[in-house]
């Protein structure tokens, strides 16, 4: 999956986040434009900062055949800075989908991981995750490891950006 995200931070606690993802599957591809709103609560001193991130996001999944599937996701994440180079993170998200084939909660996912900060623009996150999915007819379970490279295009943001995982 390839994802591009822009963030507008009007103040310390709020972010408006339009994004665009391309997902490639063995038999198809999907375009996934979305729009999210984030409220974050930050506390701590100097290096040792804690952050709780609430994310509400709408997305539409558009298949190569022109099928549209809408979804709304809520995610709750906790991050704590362990040192100048390490951030621990954990979170959970639920996705509600409505489409021709399915309407309801499609999945609940949980994640925990660690981010290594190379510099102010580049970081990598390693996060094992677990999920419960309800694709259409039966419940299934999903587990894996996400490796996320984060490249920021600009340094010196006025406010601390939210750290969250689009999973």
Image (cartoon, rainbow, N blue to C red):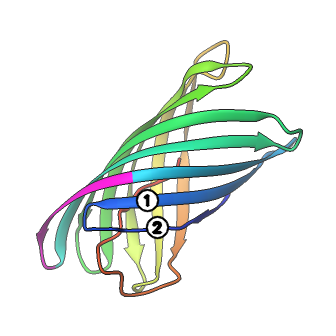
Span highlighted in magenta in the image: 38-46
Q: Which residue is depicted at the point 58% across and 17% down?
A: 139
Residue under label 2: 7
Residue 37: percent from left, percent from top: 41, 51
Quarter of the image holding residue 45? bottom left
Which disc is residue 149 wearing?
Answer: none
Q: Nearer the viewer, residue 166 or 64?
A: 64
Q: In terms of secondary structure, what is the magenta stretch mainly? A: strand
Is 98 placed left or right of 130 in the picture? Answer: right
Q: Is residue 84 above or below residue 148?
A: below
Q: Are marks 2 and 1 in contact (CB under 8 Å)?
A: yes
Residue 108: percent from left, percent from top: 47, 31
Mark 2: few/some/many CA within 10 Å (<14, 14-19, 20+): some
Farthest residue to the top: give it: 137
Residue 146: percent from left, percent from top: 54, 54
Residue under label 1: 16
Is 56 placed left or right of 149 in the picture? Answer: left
Spatial separation of the CA atoms under disc 2 and disc 1: 6 Å
Earlier in the chain: of badge 2 and badge 1, it is: 2
Q: Is residue 166 above or below residue 133?
A: below
Is 157 placed left or right of 131 in the picture? Answer: left
As for residue 112 lying within the magenta part, the answer is no
Q: SS at mark 1? A: strand
Q: Which residue is depicted at the point 38% across and 40% down?
A: 92
């Amino acid at each position: 999956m390839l994802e591009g995200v822009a963030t507008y931070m009007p103040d310390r606690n709020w972010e408006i986040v339009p994004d665009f993802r391309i997902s490639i599957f063995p038999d198809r591809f999907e375009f996934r434009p979305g729009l999210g709103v984030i409220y974050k609560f930050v506390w701590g001193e100097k290096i040792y900062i804690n952050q709780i991130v609430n994310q509400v996001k709408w997305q539409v999944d558009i298949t190569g055949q022109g099928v549209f599937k809408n979804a709304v996701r809520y995610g709750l994440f906790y991050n704590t800075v362990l040192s100048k180079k390490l951030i621990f993170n954990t979170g959970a998200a639920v996705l509600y989908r409505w489409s021709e084939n399915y309407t309801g909660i499609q999945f609940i996912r949980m994640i925990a991981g660690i981010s290594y900060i190379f510099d102010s623009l580049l970081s990598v996150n390693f996060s094992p995750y677990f999920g419960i999915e309800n694709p259409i007819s039966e419940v299934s379970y999903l587990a894996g490891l996400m490796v996320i490279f984060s490249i920021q295009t600009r340094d010196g943001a006025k406010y601390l950006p939210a750290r969250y995982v689009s999973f």
